[in-house]
Every structure is written in structure tokens, then in C-alpha cells.
Image (cartoon, helix red, strand yellow):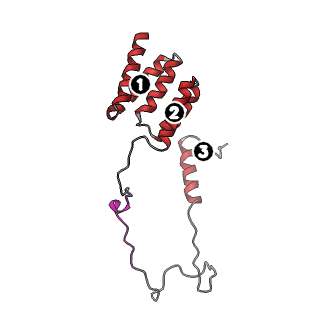
Amino acid sequence: MVNPIPKGPLLVVWMVVALVSGCAPVYAPISESGSTSPSESTSPSPETERSPPVAVPDDEDRRITPSEPVQVAPGGAVRRLLEEAWRYNKAGDYDRSNAVAERALRINHTEPEVYLVMASNYFAMTRLSLAEQLARQGLPLAGRNPTVKADLQSLLARISALK
């Protein structure tokens, strides 16, 4: 007895063919009266005017660029989230501080202070490996912020002293 359902690679080919043939659009010509009629010819009549070809913009014309350079400095939402994270940190609510800092990280993953607050939280929770990892991730980003860089280096030194 022959199995009606193909197996293995043949099944994949069969499914692709079925999907492609089932997804092909069906066009019916529309007559001048507005009804579709499959018996009418689908080729354009010679009297029909053809519109000129539309120029497709090249890649350069399709790019969207801002009119001003984008500022990456912590401002707006990231700044407010960092302030909130530090408030929770000082209150000893390290999990909530990390949750707020993670939101800031999703907005701007290049802000070194986000790594500092998270590393400080993990350090306070004695999760030293995570604190060290985050401090090391933030250190190369802190080149433009000497205060945060010094704080990250100090935190790394404190972690090394405890290991």
C-alpha cells in the first residue's frame, strides 16, 4: 500500500509547492461597466493609453536621516529613570532599582551610569560576579564621563578586594 502523505524532504517540497500555488493572486479583468468577466481579453487594447514608467528612487534617495545630529547624552527619560534607580538604590530596594535601570538600559545601552547603578545594586546584594561584569561593561563607555569612570574603577577595586 502506498502512503498518500509524503515523508521527509519530499514533504517539505510538497508543502512549499502547495503554499506557493495556493497563494498566487487571481486577477479578473474589469469591464467598462465595472463587472468582472473571465471571457474578456486581459491584454490592453491599443487605444488604451499607457502611463509613463515611474522612476524608482535609488538607495540614496530612500534613506531617512535626521536634520540634526542625534544626541546620546542621558537626557529626558533615561535621566529620570537613572534618578529613580538611584533613589531605590539608596533606599535599599536593589531589585526595584535594577528593574528601573534595565528600562533605562533598553532606551540607551551606551549610557555608562546605567551600568554603574546596576553594578552597585549587585555589589550591595553580594552578587560580585554580576557586579564585576556590569562594571567592566560600563567602563569602556565611560570615556566621556570621568566621574562615572572613576566610580566604576572604584567599584571594581572594591570587588577585587573581596574576592
Please tell me whether mark 1 sits on a helix, a strand or a loop. helix
Magenta stretch, overall SS: loop
At a point 53% along the width and 48% down the height, the residue shown is 13
The three-letter code of the residue at mark 2 reads Ala
Which residue matches tag 2? 101
The three-letter code of the residue at mark 3 reads Pro
Which residue matches tag 3? 6
Residue 79, image x and y in percent?
A: 47, 39
Please tell me whether mark 2 sits on a helix, a strand or a loop. helix
Which label was assigned to residue 135? 1
Q: Earlier in the sequence, mark 3 or mark 2?
A: 3
Q: Which residues are magenta?
A: 52-63
Q: Earlier in the sequence, mark 2 or mark 1?
A: 2
Is the C terminus in the top left, top right, bottom left or bottom right quadrant?
Answer: top left
At a point 33% along the width and 60% down the height, the residue shown is 60
The three-letter code of the residue at mark 1 reads Ala
